[in-house]
Image: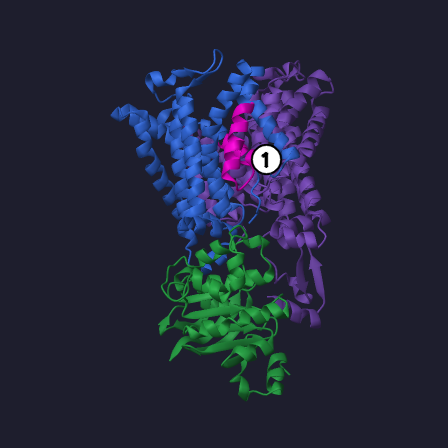
């Protein structure tokens, strides 16, 4: 492989490409899908459909964020529920107590999540590997316990979002649906651009070999902190959407470690370290939840077993399987060298 | 008779091939030195004999038996012991504990704490020092002593002189005759050619993973060695 | 004086945390694996004790004699099957696999035993205590827990320091490949470490089941407390872990005395303070392998 490229470099021109033919197809498919989803509430989506899709969109955002952390930043967090909870409380507080309206409240909730994530990173980053994982969990527990001490936030019993009161249900549900659709598009795109950026190339180096990356001048801790804060803002966004969708925030559910467990399952099932993986994973997870959740605890036993099997025997996940181990990329994040004229026919691709 | 036969092995690290069709035979009781520049494949050869690396092609035979597929920890009871490059002393263990770990397999023989301390007197005084706090010379002596504690039939020494002061190297090599005197076969890898020629009965020179010169030190000229070493 | 009492209770509670933490710490020390199923496994041990006591009517302390070897065997099997495989995969695999395992165990327990709170009944022992001063009473059972905790940690310490296998474990912890070159089978050492770790979890789990009401979700808090004790004490030092367990215990009991219902939160706060100001723990091992 490398030999033929080196040989080609001497005799032929070499182009550096990021896009592939499949990525053009991918963009087109996604654009059509998003357009269809956007007009859905006028045409073919019931209120129930829309609420379910908001849940799916939230899962996609959550999976994308956990993948950003673990798949690109090498950080396994079990404490992302902290930022989901902050986002959920944040939207309620901003919309109801500050009276900014639910749509403006979303970015406010995200900023609060990001700010708290920035602060706690100085504690969490003192740990690494598995201890980092438990450390983030402790931090999430502390944030939950502190939240339940605050009377203005409803203490242990939680609060309701009232900013939508007075709006017709179909208007409210469609508004939240469009917010969620826009959010998922933005979250995936921003993550994609972040990974494709110069910083992102450093992230990949960081994941593959932190020591080597550090000697090459990648500022390890700063890069990790950027990822950490970005992922927390994404989780805050997801939390805000959950609150807007259900109108109710309860500490035991928004701060539940089950949410992070869901994120992990989504990423592991879909495929870690790709943009597409968590999207596929979220769809599968959502479907499994719809059909298997009446199995009760057995459902999670099955999910846990599937996750372990995937980690050990199919680490590239379902997307890795579907894409033929990464040859098809809808969101190309790397660079590829393509030699000479033959690429016009696309013979070297996919 | 041959104690160790390395028979036409290829060794790879992932896509990188470090050794090409290398064959080496070591007779019982002899001391063979393998010399060569950085990256010639010397350490890889020793690691392959010790079982850390596996040959993709070819065989490693010890005492007539094919051991190519045997895990490293199963080769120690057979009598193969490697003093790894960089010494690899256990930092949180004392020097004496390092030696005791060397005797983990309880292979019977001449070597025990007492005989190791006789051979390396400096260790006797430093026995309770932690590995991490020991000097380079102490670490190297411990590393060799640790390997001897398993009473090996074949002792593999990797870059004993690396990073040590000449006087310390002298001291450590002074122990070698005593080791050979117990009937131990020694395969030593050295970048320091003079040192290698001094101690060895026979020398192999490796270049880019292939053996390019072999013979008794007395029969080889400086020029032959230099051209084999540098590949000119 | 109620403060002094709270401190005493905290110290005693620390013995239990130290038992839990020692196993977590041992596995991490030997193979750099953080077992996220550690807490869930402690609850398995608690249920095992409960079932033995309820079905056979054996005395609770006698159940330990059966639970500990069972847990040790479980640990051995777990290491030979799942964990060794996970350790050979990419860096995140052990964390993800043990997390998945925790989820599986917790939900299996929910199916088997429901979410109801249960407790292992030790009869009058649960309430008997020794009056030290008019204000300080030491519960007999917490005292037994503490003594067992200290003894077990002392034994483990001696085992690691003085025996050949203990030495092999420390060598493997320092440098796995060099240990292999000494003829040490790292898979055997890993399995032994996990067996010992889960044996300790077996003792701790039964004590926990006697001490408090528990249900399948208790594994989460158990894991967190064990982890906090390890970090407060400092990595790699068993006596540090015991001290870490006691400090966490004191923080929780004194915290609960000061702000009822916030004991656990204060334990977390002490952990975070240690992380902020002494990230290597209060009693770190001098040498880092």
Chain of residue at mark 1: C
Asked whether residue A212 appears in the rendered view, the answer is yes
The image shows residue B129 at horizontal and vertical percentages of 54, 53
| Residue nearer the viewer, C109 or C204 | C204
Span shown in magenta? C223-251
Question: What is the secondary structure assignment of the residue under circle 1?
Answer: loop
Residue C243 falls inside the magenta stretch = yes
Give the blue chain's letter. C
Residue drawn where x is 52% and y is 63% of the image: B121
User: Chain B shown in which color?
Assistant: green
The image quadrant where one finds the N terminus of chain B is bottom left
| Residue nearer the viewer, A70 or B80 | B80
Above or below residue B109? Residue C90 is above
Asked whether residue A234 appears in the rendered view, the answer is no
Check disc 1 and report the residue beneath it: C282
User: Chain A shown in which color?
Assistant: purple
| Residue nearer the viewer, B45 or B221 | B221
Above or below residue A212? Residue A299 is above
Q: Main secondary structure of the magenta part?
A: helix
């Amino acid at each position: 492989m490398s030999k033929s490229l080196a040989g080609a470099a001497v005799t032929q021109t070499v182009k550096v490409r990021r896009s592939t033919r499949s990525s053009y197809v991918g963009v087109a498919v996604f654009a059509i899908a998003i357009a269809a989803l956007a007009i859905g509430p006028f045409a073919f989506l019931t209120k129930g459909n829309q609420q379910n899709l908001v849940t799916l969109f939230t899962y996609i955002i959550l999976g994308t964020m956990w993948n950003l952390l673990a798949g690109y930043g090498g950080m396994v967090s079990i404490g992302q529920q902290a930022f989901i909870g902050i986002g959920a409380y944040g939207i309620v507080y901003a919309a109801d107590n500050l009276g900014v309206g639910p749509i403006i409240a979303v970015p406010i909730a995200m900023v609060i999540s990001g700010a708290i994530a920035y602060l706690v990173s100085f504690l969490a980053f003192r740990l690494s590997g598995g201890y980092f994982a438990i450390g983030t969990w402790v931090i999430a527990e502390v944030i939950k316990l502190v939240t339940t001490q605050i009377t203005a936030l409803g203490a242990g019993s939680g609060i309701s979002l009232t900013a939508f009161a007075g709006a017709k249900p179909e208007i409210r549900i469609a508004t939240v649906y469009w917010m969620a659709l826009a959010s998922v598009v933005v979250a995936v795109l921003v993550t994609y651009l972040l990974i494709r950026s110069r910083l992102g190339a450093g992230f990949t180096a960081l994941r593959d070999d932190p020591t080597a990356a550090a000697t090459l001048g990648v500022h390890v801790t700063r890069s990790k902190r950027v990822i950490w804060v970005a992922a927390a803002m994404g989780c805050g966004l997801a939390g805000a959407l959950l609150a807007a969708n259900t109108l109710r925030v309860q500490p035991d559910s928004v701060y539940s470690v089950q949410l992070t467990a869901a994120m992990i399952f989504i990423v592991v099932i879909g495929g870690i370290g790709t943009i597409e993986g968590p999207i596929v994973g979220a769809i599968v997870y959502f479907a499994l939840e719809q059909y298997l959740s009446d199995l009760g605890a057995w459902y999670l036993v099955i999910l846990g077993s599937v996750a372990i099997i995937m980690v050990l025997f199919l680490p590239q996940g379902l997307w890795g399987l579907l894409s033929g181990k990464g040859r098809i990329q809808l969101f190309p994040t790397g660079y590829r060298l393509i030699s000479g004229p033959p690429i016009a026919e696309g013979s070297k691709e996919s | 008779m041959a104690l160790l036969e390395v028979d036409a092995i290829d060794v790879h690290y992932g896509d990188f091939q470090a050794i090409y069709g290398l064959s080496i035979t070591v007779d019982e009781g002899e001391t063979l030195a393998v010399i060569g520049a950085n990256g010639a494949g010397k350490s890889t050869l020793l690691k392959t004999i010790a079982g850390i690396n596996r040959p993709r092609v070819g065989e490693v035979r010890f005492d007539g038996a094919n051991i190519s597929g045997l895990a490293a920890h199963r080769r120690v009871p057979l009598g193969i012991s490697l003093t790894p490059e960089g010494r690899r002393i256990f930092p949180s263990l004392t020097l004496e504990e390092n030696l005791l770990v060397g005797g983990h397999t309880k292979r019977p023989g001449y070597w025990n704490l007492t005989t190791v301390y006789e051979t390396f007197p400096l260790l006797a005084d430093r026995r309770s020092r932690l590995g991490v706090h020991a000097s380079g010379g102490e670490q190297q002596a411990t590393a060799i002593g640790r390997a001897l504690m398993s009473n090996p039939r074949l002792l593999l020494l990797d870059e004993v002189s690396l990073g040590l002061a000449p006087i310390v190297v002298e001291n450590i090599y002074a122990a070698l005759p005593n080791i050979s005197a117990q009937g131990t076969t020694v395969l030593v890898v050295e970048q320091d050619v003079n040192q290698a020629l001094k101690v060895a009965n026979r020398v192999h020179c490796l270049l880019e993973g292939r053996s390019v010169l072999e013979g008794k030190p007395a029969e080889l000229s400086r020029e032959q060695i230099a051209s084999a070493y540098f590949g000119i | 004086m109620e403060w002094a009492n709270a401190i005493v209770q905290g110290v005693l509670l620390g013995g239990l945390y130290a038992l839990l933490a020692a196993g977590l710490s041992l596995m991490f020390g030997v193979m750099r694996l953080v077992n996220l199923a550690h807490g869930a496994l402690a609850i398995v041990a608690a249920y095992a004790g409960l079932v033995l006591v309820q079905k056979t009517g054996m005395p609770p302390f006698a159940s330990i004699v059966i639970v500990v070897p069972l847990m040790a065997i479980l640990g051995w099997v777990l290491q030979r099957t799942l964990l060794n495989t996970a350790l050979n995969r990419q860096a995140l695999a052990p964390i993800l696999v043990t997390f998945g395992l925790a989820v599986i165990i917790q939900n299996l327990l929910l199916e088997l035993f429901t979410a109801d709170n249960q407790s292992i009944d030790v009869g009058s022992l649960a309430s008997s205590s020794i009056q030290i001063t008019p204000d300080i009473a030491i519960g007999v059972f917490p005292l037994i827990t503490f003594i067992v905790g200290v003894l077990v940690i002392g034994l483990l310490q001696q085992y690691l320091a003085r025996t050949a296998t203990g030495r092999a474990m420390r060598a493997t912890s320092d440098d796995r490949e060099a240990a292999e070159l000494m003829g040490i089978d790292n898979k055997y050492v890993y399995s032994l470490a996990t067996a010992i770790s889960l044996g300790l979890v077996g003792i701790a789990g039964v004590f926990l089941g006697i001490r408090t009401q528990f249900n399948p979700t208790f594994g989460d808090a158990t894991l967190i407390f064990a982890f906090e004790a390890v970090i407060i004490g400092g990595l790699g030092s068993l006596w540090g872990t015991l001290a870490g367990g006691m400090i966490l215990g004191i923080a929780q009991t004194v915290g609960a005395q000061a702000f009822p219902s916030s004991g656990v939160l204060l334990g977390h706060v002490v952990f975070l303070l240690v992380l902020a100001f002494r990230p290597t723990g209060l009693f770190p091992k001098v040498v880092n392998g």
